[in-house]
């Protein structure tokens, strides 16, 4: 178990959790996490054996071709649009397809209405995002994601009833000091 302050990112707790797992001689084969843990060292420094089950960020583009319609070649770092125009990409950057190519493209109306051409944002860990999207598009992947439903629904109910304010418990002495200090101000 790991306790962190409310203003500490959730992923920071994994360092303490990993220490506990090592102490118990437990090795991770699967991680069923939410997106707050995607920046943890378990995910960023994982080996190929560790499977991650997490709902990926949604990809939308208002009825036009979304990012999933583009092919990212991770060996050559080229992204290809549905019309087979390929240009280099870097993770964490925005790809700008050439304006002149987009202007004459027969698929333009289904891709973009920008006069400057199509852009595609590449997540810093886009390869993982693609892996998660591919996994959640299968029946087994959706079944594994549903294992989190009980926890997610419980958290949603707490958030609904409690709002965005956390409730804290303190000793009577601390509560009295806090109340007294507020009365003096």
Image (cartoon, helix red, strand yellow):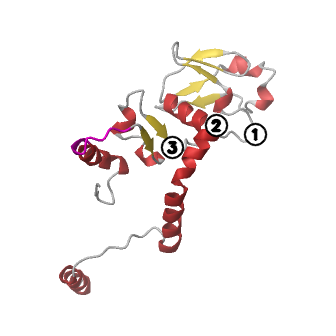
Residue 180: x and y in percent read 21, 86
Front: mark 1 or 3: 3
The image quarter containing residue 21 is top left
Q: Which residues make up the magenta segment?
A: 22-28
Q: CB of mark 2 within 8 Å of CB of mark 3? A: no
Evaluate whether residue 9 shows in this view. Answer: yes
The tag on residue 54 is: 3
Circle nearer the N terminus (2, 3): 3
Circle nearer the N terminus (1, 3): 3
Q: Which residue is mark 1?
A: 63
Secondary structure of residue under mark 3: loop
Which residue is more in the foreground, 153 or 166?
Answer: 153
Q: Which residue is mark 2?
A: 138
Front: mark 2 or 1: 2
Which residue is more in the foreground, 11 or 134?
Answer: 134
Secondary structure of residue under mark 2: loop
């Amino acid at each position: 178990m790991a306790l962190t302050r409310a203003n500490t990112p959730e992923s920071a707790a994994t360092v303490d959790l990993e220490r506990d797992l090592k102490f118990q001689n437990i090795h991770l084969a699967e991680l069923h996490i939410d997106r707050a843990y995607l920046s943890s060292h378990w995910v960023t420094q994982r080996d190929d054996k560790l499977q991650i089950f997490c709902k990926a960020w949604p990809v939308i583009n208002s009825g036009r071709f979304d990012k999933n319609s583009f092919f990212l070649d991770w060996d050559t770092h080229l992204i290809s649009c549905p019309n087979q125009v390929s240009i280099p990409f870097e993770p964490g950057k925005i790809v700008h397809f050439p304006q002149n190519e987009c202007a004459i493209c027969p698929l333009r109306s289904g891709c973009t209405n920008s006069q400057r051409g199509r852009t595609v944002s590449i997540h810093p860990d886009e390869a993982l995002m693609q892996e998660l999207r591919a996994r959640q598009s299968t029946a087994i992947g959706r079944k594994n994601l549903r294992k989190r439903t009980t926890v997610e629904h419980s958290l949603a109910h707490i958030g609904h009833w409690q709002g965005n304010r956390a409730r804290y418990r303190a000793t009577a002495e601390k509560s009295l000091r806090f109340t007294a200090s507020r009365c003096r101000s």
